[in-house]
Amino acid sequence: MSSVLFVKSGRSPLLRDGWGRLYSRAMDALTIDNLHKSYDGKEVVKGISFSIGQGEIFGLLGPNGAGKSTTINMIVGVAKLGAGQISAFGYDNQRDYRKTRQMLGVVHQEIVIDNFFTIDQAMKLHSGYYGVKDDPAWRAMLIQRLGLEPYLDKVMLKLSGGLKRRFMIAKALIHRPKLLILDEPTAGVDVELRHGLWDFVREINRQGTTILLTTHYLEEAEQMCDRIAIMNHGELIALEETQELVRRLSSRQLRLWLEQPLAELPAGLDFYAPKLEEEGRLLLLNLPAGVRAGDLLAQICGLEIKISDIETEQSGLEEVFIQLTGMQGMSA
């Protein structure tokens, strides 16, 4: 496995107030400290620590079995903590369970619905589960934005998978949570709904809602997330701003259009996996992370190869993910 590339987030350490409650100086939206969890004697979350700042869109990524969903289940109180501490907006999620549950909304990876309620009935009832009074205007906005208006009188047992997913998102937001947790929210939904969902997530984020996202669509994570943490085998192996992580660890391809075609590959370029195309007029070279393009171009010039044009193409988060985890893509 690749060497660990965990990068400290620079967040303040955990403190305790006069009542012994956990909090951080920066009052992060979420703070996780030395979190552990085992099932049947097997440790599935191995002492991870990270924090999410208020207003962030934060990605928690990893292959199947990495410990992401277990971590989320501990955050929202579905699973007990093995060891460690979790706080949401300064409140310990064990001691202040009711308060933290009011602050969190979660869309689980699995479809979780009340089969025999209509959408209208469920939406009117659900905020009360959190001790929050129903807000008809907010409820109507969620119904309208998520395209649920034509289906209000349908029982959820009869809804399609995509509509059930929309309802789960509305249900997670009905009590106006400060932190919305999305665990594979677009799994199995069509492209139109996926794009509409991300537009809506960006909108509520701009209004102040913090987002914790897991997804196996790495392109989505790269576009959406301010920072990304990558888990593998229960451990946190990377934590960094998304663009910086991609910049540091992804490779680039240089496409050199030549004034004169080459009959064979130049000597001394094997390190860059050279390849000739377009009848010898296009030289392709892979530039590994950490290697400067200027050094390669100087080497090319030293070979007296005349270049008419240069194009560069940088790989994205998917390559970084594969490099760190050894997985060829993410499992659902």
Image (spheres, helix red, strand yellow):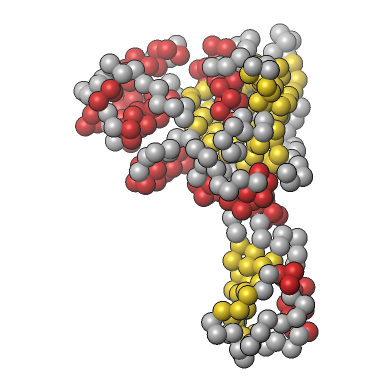
Quadrant for residue 298, please give it: bottom right
Relative depth, front residue between 254 and 177: 254
Q: Position of residue 70 (x, y in %)?
A: 58, 25
Quadrant for residue 88, please give it: top right
Quadrant for residue 257, please give it: bottom right
- Tell me what residue is drawn at x 50 percent, y 32 percent: 183
- Tell me what residue is drawn at x 71 percent, y 62 percent: 288
- Tell me what residue is drawn at x 77 percent, y 73 percent: 295
Relative depth, front residue between 119 and 279: 279
Q: Position of residue 52 (x, y in %)?
A: 63, 33
Q: Position of residue 195 (x, y in %)?
A: 39, 46
Instruction: Count all numbered tags in the image, as a single digit.
Output: 0
Q: Position of residue 215 (x, y in %)?
A: 51, 39
Relative depth, front residue between 245 and 315: 315
Q: Is residue 40 visible?
A: yes
| Left or right side of 295 for 158 | left
- Tell me what residue is drawn at x 70 percent, y 41 percent: 238
Q: Is residue 58 visible?
A: no
Quarter of the rendering occupied by the N terminus:
top right
Please say if 305 is above or below 310: below
| Identity of the residue furthest to the bottom in this view | 260
| Left or right side of 76 for 204 | left
Please say if 283 is above or below 98: below
Relative depth, front residue between 81 and 32: 81
